Every structure is written in structure tokens, then in C-alpha cells.
Image (cartoon, grey):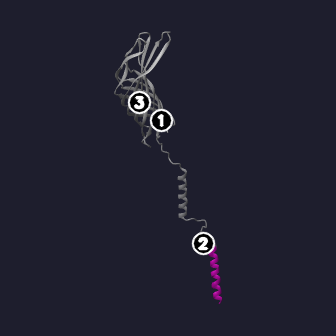
Amino acid sequence: MRLLITVFLNLIIVGLFAQRNPNTNAGKINPNYKSDTSINNQTNSAVSSSNQAVPPIAIDDNNSIQLGASLNYGTTLNQSDIMENGFGFGIKLGFNLIKDAPIALYTGLGFDYLYFGGKKISQANNVDVAINSNAYGWYPYADLELGPNWPITIFGTAFWGGRFFYTRQNITFYDAQNNKQTNTKNLEGDATQIYGYGGGIKLNLSKGIKMELRYLKNFGNYSKVVDPKTIEFDSFGNLKSYQNKYTDTDLGVYSIGLILNF
């Protein structure tokens, strides 16, 4: 009996000593310990948050619509005694077929107007005659641009369409009371097929706005225009007769204008 009591007391003493001994495993357990899996999850979460905080890289997108207006100066490529130099304007509307690229291809429709002031011819009785031709061109076109987002864009262009010529007669004379009179009458009209090519540069002024400098070589058929040298009047100063003359309509057209990109 005494032996059992002694063994029992020794076991109690050993248990108490084990609980207080810092070298035992019980004392090494950290209640705040997290497994490697938990640490990895925290790391992945931080990386994911970091990725979400970085904004996506923006891709410079070429504009889809091009609207242009210009002032034009046209001159004959071949010497003509009827049509010389013309002044006017032009407009164009195109759509870009190539996106997200260092080039752009705009295709659309162009229109231009050129006024050719004829030479004045003096007739008897203080009568001056001038034949003016108004030329209207309609044509599909294509502009191929290199570096559409650069400060200076280089482009080439090609077109095909038609041009309509309308001739107008301006007669200036003095009546019996020596008052100056002007008589205007539309005489003839003709049309010709046109085609050509050209190019130029576009200067970036601000976002969506460019200045365009362009040259076009316009080829056309021979067109029927009134020859002012053949105009005759009767004794009352009325138009008696005139003759038409075919003239070459090849033109060199210089333009300066503005381009709006949307």
C-alpha cells in the first residue's frame, strides 16, 4: 500500500514538472501560428490586389471618320486659251478601314468646285465679253496615311469620278444713255470623266484637328467649252452666234484645308 502511494505521488510530480518545463513541446506551440498555405493565400491576394491597381495600357486607336474642307487652286497642265487658272473649294468625307495600326486607309466621297474666269474680249460699241466656266467634280477617293497619330502624317491619294462644266457668258456694255449694263446668260454644259492621284502631308494641330496640304494631278477627257473669240453680236448688241471648242481638262490642283477626325 505504501508502495502504491509512493508511485502515485511520483507520477503527479513528473506531470507537474513536464507542464512547467520550457523544453517540452507543449510550450513550443504558438496559438497565432498560420500554415504555409495560409501565407501563400495572403501573398496571392496581395499580388492580385496589386495587379488590379495597375490601369490597363491604352492602345492608340485610329479615328474612324474623316471630314475635310479645303481651298483649291487649279491650273491647266496643258496650255489652253480658254481655261487658265481656277479657284474654288472642296469637301470630303471618308471612313477608316484599318484600325490599331501605324497606317490608315480612308475611303469616301469627295466634291470640289473650280471657277475659271475667261479672258475678256472687247467688241465694237464698248462691249466686253467674258466667258466663265464653272466646274463641279464628284469622285470616290482613297487616302493611305503613314503615321496617322504622328505630329506630321504623310499620305497618298487616288480618285476616280466625273466633272461637270457649265459655261456662263457675261456681257458688259454701255446703253444709249451711257449707263453700264451687264447681261449674264448660261450657254453650254458638258461633262468629262476624271481620275488621278496625288499626296501631301497632314499637320497635327490639336486632338482630332489637322491641317492638310495636298496636290492632285487630275486627268480628264476633252470637254466642250464656248470659245469667246467666236462670239458675234447683231447691230442691237444681242448675242448672234458662237462656237464651241474642245479643250483639254487635265488639271493640277493645289489645296490647303482642315481635317476633323472622329
Name which residue lies at 47% across and 35% down.
67
Sequence-wise, which precedes: disc 3 or disc 1?
1
Q: In which quarter of the image is the N terminus?
A: bottom right
> Whole-Å distance between the Cαs marked 3 and 1?
17 Å
Q: Height in image: 97 above or below 175?
A: below
Closest to the observer: 262 or 114?
114
> Could you say where residue 9 lies in the image, as x and y percent from the top left?
65, 83
> Whole-Å distance between the Cαs marked 2 and 3?
98 Å
Residue assigned mark 2: 26
Residue assigned mark 1: 67
Residue at the far bottom: name it: 1
| Crowd band around label 1 with a 10 angstrom C-alpha radius: few (<14), some (14–19), many (20+) | some
Sequence-wise, which precedes: disc 2 or disc 1?
2
* In contact (CB < 8 Å): disc 3 and disc 1: no
Sequence-wise, which precedes: disc 2 or disc 3?
2
Amino acid identity at mark 2: Ala
Q: Is mark 3 on a helix, strand or loop?
A: strand
Identify the mark at residue 137; answer none if there is no mark: 3
